Image (tube, helix red, strand yellow):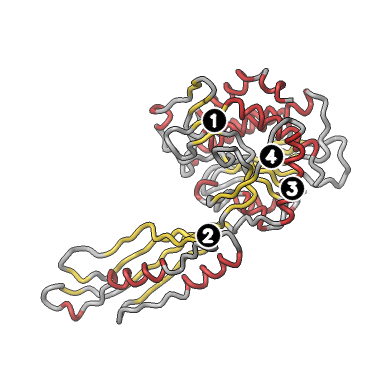
Amino acid sequence: MITHFTQQQDAMLAMIEHLVQYESPSADALRLNALADQLAELFAPLGTVERHANPAGGDHVSIHVPAPHALADARPALVLCHFDTVWPVGTLAERPFRVAGELAYGPGAYDMKASFALAHFALRAISELGLTLPRPVHLLFTSDEEIGSPAGRPVIEAAARKAAYTLVLEPPVAPHSALKTARKGGGHFVVELIGRAAHAGVEPEKGASAVTEMAHQILALNALNDMTQGSTVNVGVVQGGTRPNVVPAHARLDIDVRAWSTAETERLTKAIHSLTPVTPDVQLRVEGDFRRPPMERTPVAQALFKQAQAIGATLDLQLTEDRTGGGSDGNFTAALGVPTLDGLGTPGEGAHANHEQIQIAGLFERAALLTALLTKLTV
């Protein structure tokens, strides 16, 4: 089956290059919707297109691919992609799409526009090779994954509740292209400290330093780290004070929090919201929560991986599994108890980095694998 895709190398790479030309930073609704239009046009011959309006950004796009020979009550296979990228407009002019030997480079190609071509050619192959879908396919493209999926999450969760399983076309784990069966949950918290300003030389005793309190809170937050559990609390941004000769009245901490398990997310959330000030006359406010729940390595997830591994072996692919501290939209589906397998995108490296690249041979292998999974999984 891999040969079927190898023979279409030029067409697959041309489609990736075309999609990369549409710069799509998460906050640019106009450009996101331009790419949504392209996706709708590209996939319309394969199924029914549905647009999910997103007033806060780009629309999300669903492609519903029918399965004429499936049982009437067959739940669909949900396939997740996102079309926003971290790259600002103008990046393409600096680093245009290019092919060099066995690799293809371009901003957003690895994360994750190559996956769109992968999905398109896999769905086409089902009819071209005379294969049968045992269930419909719901291919969902969201526009805000890179910023935590604030508008995409309800659309994803609604689709997941109807699905038999979820396949996520995010990049695999480098360097061995492992599939992802676990991801950390990720949270963002803000601690705001409100003190009282005073002249640092004339009457410092009348002040209450928010920056001094900030130092106490940084130490308290650092104490919440538990490396044995893989739980991390990172005070990534600190702000405070106005001038050296003013007792600072305000300070702020921006905090990234990650954990493998729901139990740890609950512990950390409770602990951060329970922080109390040490410095007299300084007030403390906490906002935030976990934006993405953990994608835990459950028996359901393991069973799906084992099936995928066996199917991959029929293609002479030796699939392995791994976990990652980054989150994806698969976190949401897994947290609902839906069997979820992530990292099925094109092998390569350099997500969010200047050397972002895909392995061309890996593109063909993953297209064949997706075709096989959609036609052979029995979940």
How many numbered marks does the figure carry? 4
Give the number of the disc on residue 358: 1
Relative vertical location of residue 196 with respect to residue 362 in this rendering, above or below: below
Whether residue 24 sits left or right of residue 124 in the image: it is left
Q: Nearer the viewer, mark 2 or mark 3?
A: 2
Q: Residue at x 48, y 29 (%)?
A: 106
State the SS at label 1: strand
Q: Position of residue 351 (x, y in %)?
A: 49, 39
Residue denoted by label 3: 304
The N terminus sits in image quarter: top right
Q: CA–CA distance between discs 4 and 2?
A: 33 Å
Give amino acid for label 1: Ile
Q: Position of residue 165 (x, y in %)?
A: 74, 48
Q: Position of residue 190 (x, y in %)?
A: 42, 64
State the SS at label 3: helix
Give amino acid for label 4: Leu
Relative vertical location of residue 4 with respect to residue 63 in this rendering, above or below: above
Residue denoted by label 4: 139
The earlier-in-sequence mark between 2 and 1 is: 2
Give amino acid for label 3: Leu
Whether residue 200 sits left or right of residue 302 in the image: it is left
Name the image quarter holding residue 185. bottom right
Whether residue 19 sits left or right of residue 207 in the image: it is right
